[in-house]
Image (cartoon, grey):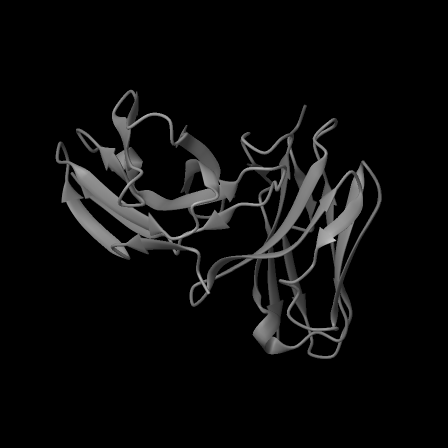
Amino acid sequence: DAGVIQSPRHEVTEMGQEVTLRCKPISGHNSLFWYRQTMMRGLELLIYFNNNVPIDDSGMPEDRFSAKMPNASFSTLKIQPSEPRDSAVYFCANKQGARTEAFFGQGTRLTVV
Amino acid sequence: QQQVKQSPQSLIVQKGGISIINCAYENTAFDYFPWYQQFPGKGPALLIAIRPDVSEKKEGRFTISFNKSAKQFSLHIMDSQPGDSATYFCAASIRGGDYKLSFGAGTTVTVRA
């Protein structure tokens, strides 16, 4: 298995544009998480899914952020419209159970100018 | 608010020295305490984890010490090497099927040769 695959690795966009980040999770790992990492706030959990169902989206900062997991093989995080303060590294992570390892993707570095 | 408090924010240690990172928590429902290691440009990766029924776990040069009554746990890196230079995150998750991890703010460790 290639692990958690995120795309794109880097994204530069202008303020106001829509941004879509993609994640291909590990097969058979039924929990998927989206994290945002910044110097100021560290690793913040945005949303997590269990068996493709959103369980907790309390970390999503605003209505501009939305996430979907249409099937076990794919998830997206969308920001519309994007703002400069959304600039961060966004990670997708997978777990198979409560006390198991979370596997992180390489992250998408988003810059909104 | 951050459910897991981590200190120090950064530390510098000489090659061969001991690096110590401390974490504290309040939620007694936490029952799984992993440490993640992150290199620049990469996602965090599991380093070592402990459950509250043991007071210490050692893997190679890395040791977790756990004090349940004080609600504290720490990571010791023995014989620190330049390759250990990274950011380290402590984390915790609760029992009962909740899969999400609460991360500390991170500690950047620099090992000088």
Q: Position of residue A76 (x, y in %)?
A: 77, 52
Residue in the image at 42% along x and 37% along y: B33
Give left or right: position of B5 versus A19. left
* Residue in front for this viewpoint, B30 or A92: B30
User: Most extreme residue toward the right, as rendered?
Assistant: A70
Residue in the image at 58% along x and 68% along y: A87
Give left or right: position of A89 versus B33. right
Give left or right: position of B66 versus B50. left
* Residue in front for this viewpoint, B22 or B38: B22
Give left or right: position of A62 versus A68. left
Q: Position of residue B7 (x, y in %)?
A: 27, 54
* Residue in front for this viewpoint, B93 or B70: B70
Q: Position of residue B34 (x, y in %)?
A: 43, 36
Name the quarter where the C terminus of chain B is drawn: top left
Residue in the image at 55% along x and 37% along y: B95
Residue in the image at 25% along x and 25% along y: B61
Q: Quadrant of residue A90?
A: bottom right
In the rendered image of this protein, does residue B4 appear above or below residue A39?
above
Q: Quadrant of residue A61?
A: bottom right
In the rendered image of this protein, does residue A73 appear above or below residue B55?
below
